[in-house]
């Protein structure tokens, strides 16, 4: 007989079992199920508690109804009376499903008086799909690495967007620019942000910093903050800033309060005095008045960052770029950063995002990131997800969703004070989350993207659930086709020819987590993993021998091993978009990030050999543009 705690876990979306990438079968144990339920906010230490939850059912959660914007939704509510609150606040009352009105684009809420209960319903009025972009190309580059000295700044993007626009490039992509941890400059990973709905102010240009092959975040961040503080103290508030304060309201004030408290108590709110660990506590309310000047400073920094990015996007569109900036949305957020402090209810606590065991990590991975709680997402009508998308697309025309497999299922690793517990998958409301993406992409049509609508890219790499790629394609979300992974055979390497690539995709050779063209050919990633202690010498020899076979296999598809041949191959694919990498254009060997390492490798610190001004004029970039034009891009 199944333990009722397991039965409850399965009913709430925790998988009973799964197969990892190596084909190993894993069964979710009771202790893991109990821990993950607790992370969702469901206490079920005993079977009696689980029985109570099962008896209550899911009636307290809203139904999700996805339908085409501009049509009337169909609801299974019979002749029940209902109250509809449109997204704009308009309230409409009626009776019977047949009397529901046509609803515009947006997320609306309805309460139906069913015979046995009152039922909340979330109505997601979305476009059927996001239109595919025209055939085009663009470049990706690490923002922090674009300057000669210090940390790369938003202004360093301007020479590149002007150059790319003149050359026919449609977008410029970069690492995530979410708000980080200025109170602790050692926490600089762009994929472990403090708040994904706010911006990284350390990319504001202050003309400070030292040169060298590595970006020294720990040294540069305090210098940049000091320079920004001096600028803030010297200037009167611009009317545009005051308007921004009013428009952003309490949400911005709460974020800025977190930053001000971080300056005093440290970056992680979990280590603060208990009375400050919630933004609505009496102590936090008192701090809003006591720290008013600091709150204004951190609010001003956000205004400066948003203004800087908006200016770059406007310049990109004016230069003729189809999409302009291409931002990156991190898969999760730091569990004790500004995002979880402000919006505690949207996240699961007591579990971290991660990955199941694979060939590179026999014990699986723990990413140290807080996941969205799927129950809370449904309960809030996807407010946090919607705002997260909207914030990115406000200043960009394209958005990449890191690890979009998490729209189908996320792998949660329980936190445990005692024996380490294995993780398991948790089902996410995929169709509703994709509807939110389509809604926000459509809203971007009149804003940052020059009226063309936003483009969503999903990083669909790894252990892909059945049906996900079909759902993404149906929603108009482009997949990622990375050339080093596009093959017919892995053991006896055989790569796909250009014509076999998917159309609804963005094609590239690599990503920030993978080796560059030259690095891959030389096996630099394998050697780096051995030096970092990830593999032993005999495994390094084995993998280097296999890499030589891989290089020979891909060379059979190319006329020569040069980057021009590589870019011509990518340009010939049916994929609607092609992303060329600055690191490849500049002939770099080392990759920006080596997964599974921290201090063993200079992750997120490698400076490009040319700054943005030189890169914008580089002969190789002009050659890339010529190749793209020759292939009708």
Image: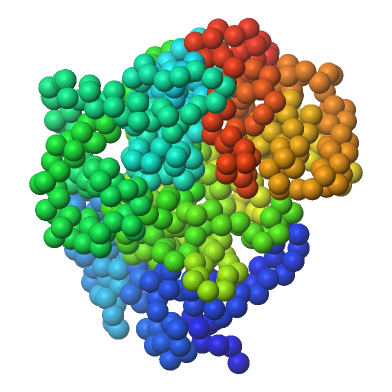
Residue 67 falls in image quadrant: bottom left
For residue 12, above or below residue 6:
above
Image coloring type = rainbow
Judge whether 285 appears above or below 519 on screen: below
Which quadrant does the N terminus fall into? bottom right
Answer with left or right where residue 145 lies relative to residue 600.
left
Residue 261, x across and y down, in percent: 24, 47
Viewed as shown, does residue 269 lie left or right of 215?
left
**Along the line of sight, the residue nearer the viewer: 42 or 59:** 42
Does residue 523 lie above or below 79 as drawn? above
Q: Position of residue 214 (x, y in %)?
A: 55, 26
Residue 5 visible somewhere in the drawing: yes
Q: Nearer the viewer, residue 569 or 47?
A: 47
Instruction: Specify the quadrant of the image occupied by residue 486.
Output: top right
Q: Nearer the viewer, residue 477 or 126?
A: 477
Query: Residue placed at 61% from the left, 13% from the top?
Result: 621
Residue 327 is at least partly visible in this image? no
Q: Which residue is pictured at 44% across the width and 25% down the height?
A: 151
- Quadrant assignment, res 602: top right
Q: Which quadrant is the C terminus positioned in?
A: top right
Spot occupied by residue 350 in the image (x, y as percentages of width and height): 44, 66
Total numbered circles? 0
Image location (x, y in percent) of residue 525: 72, 36
Apparent side of residue 426 relative to residue 68 in the rendered image (left or right): right
165, 273: nearer the viewer? 273
- Residue shown at 88%/39% (left/top)? 545
Check the image and name the residue furthest to the front. Answer: 219
Please name the residue shown 76% across and 48% down the image: 535
């Amino acid at each position: 007989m199944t333990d009722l705690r397991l039965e409850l876990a399965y009913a709430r979306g925790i998988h009973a079992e799964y197969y990892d990438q190596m084909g190993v079968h894993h069964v979710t144990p009771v202790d893991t199920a109990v821990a993950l339920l607790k992370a969702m906010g469901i206490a079920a230490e005993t079977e009696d508690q689980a029985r109570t939850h099962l008896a209550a059912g899911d009636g307290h959660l809203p139904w999700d109804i996805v339908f085409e914007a501009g049509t009337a939704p169909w609801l299974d509510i019979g002749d029940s009376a209902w109250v509809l609150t449109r997204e704009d606040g308009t309230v409409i009352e009626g009776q019977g499903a047949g009397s529901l009105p046509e609803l515009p684009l947006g997320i609306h809420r309805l309460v139906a008086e069913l015979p046995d209960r009152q039922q909340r319903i979330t109505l997601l009025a979305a476009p059927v799909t996001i239109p595919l972009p025209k055939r085009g190309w663009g470049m990706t580059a690490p923002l922090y690495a674009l300057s000669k000295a210090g940390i790369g700044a938003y202004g360093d993007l301007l020479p590149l967007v002007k150059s790319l626009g003149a050359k026919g490039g449609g977008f410029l992509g970069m690492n995530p620019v979410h708000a980080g941890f200025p109170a602790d400059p050692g926490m600089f990973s762009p994929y472990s942000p403090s708040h994904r709905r706010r911006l990284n102010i350390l990319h504001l240009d202050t003309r400070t910093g030292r040169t060298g092959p590595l970006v020294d975040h720990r040294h540069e961040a305090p210098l940049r903050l000091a320079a920004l503080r001096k600028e803030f103290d010297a200037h009167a508030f611009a009317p545009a800033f005051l308007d921004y304060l009013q428009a952003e309201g309490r949400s911005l004030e709460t974020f800025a309060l977190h930053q001000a408290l971080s300056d005093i108590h440290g970056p992680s709110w979990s280590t603060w005095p208990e009375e400050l660990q919630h933004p609505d506590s009496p102590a936090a309310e008192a701090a809003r008045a006591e720290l008013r000047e600091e709150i204004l400073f951190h609010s001003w920094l956000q205004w400066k960052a948003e203004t800087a990015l908006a200016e770059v996007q406007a310049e990109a569109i004016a230069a003729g770029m189809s999409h302009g900036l291409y931002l990156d949305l991190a898969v999760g957020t730091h569990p004790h950063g500004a995002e979880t402090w402000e919006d505690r209810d949207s996240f699961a606590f007591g579990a971290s995002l991660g990955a199941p065991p694979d060939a590179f990590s026999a014990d699986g991975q723990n990413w140290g990131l807080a996941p969205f709680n799927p129950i809370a997402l449904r309960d809030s009508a996807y407010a946090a997800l919607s705002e997260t998308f909207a914030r990115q697309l406000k200043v960009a025309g394209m958005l990449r969703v890191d690890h979009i497999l998490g729209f189908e299922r996320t792998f949660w690793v329980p936190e445990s004070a005692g024996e380490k517990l294995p993780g398991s998958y948790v089902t996410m409301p995929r169709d509703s989350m994709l509807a939110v993406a389509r809604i926000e992409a459509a809203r971007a049509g009149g804003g940052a993207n020059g009226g063309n609508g936003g483009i969503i890219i999903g990083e669909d790499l790894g252990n892909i659930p059945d049906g996900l790629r079909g759902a993404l394609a149906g929603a108009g979300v482009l997949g990622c086709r990375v050339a080093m992974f596009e093959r017919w055979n892995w053991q006896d390497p055989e790569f796909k020819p250009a014509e076999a690539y998917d159309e609804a995709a963005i094609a590239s050779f690599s990503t920030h987590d993978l080796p560059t063209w030259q690095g891959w050919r030389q096996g630099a990633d394998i050697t780096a993993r051995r030096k970092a202690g990830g593999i032993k010498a005999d495994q390094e020899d084995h993998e280097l021998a296999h890499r030589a076979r891989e290089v020979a296999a891909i060379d059979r598809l190319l006329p020569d091993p040069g980057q021009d041949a590589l870019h011509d191959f990518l340009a010939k694919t049916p994929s609607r978009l092609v992303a060329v990498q600055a690191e490849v254009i500049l002939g770099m060997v080392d990759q920006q990030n080596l997964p599974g390492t921290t201090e063993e490798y200079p992750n997120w610190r490698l400076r490009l050999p040319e700054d943005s001004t030189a890169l914008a004029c580089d002969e190789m970039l002009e050659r890339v543009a010529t190749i793209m034009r020759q292939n009708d891009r």
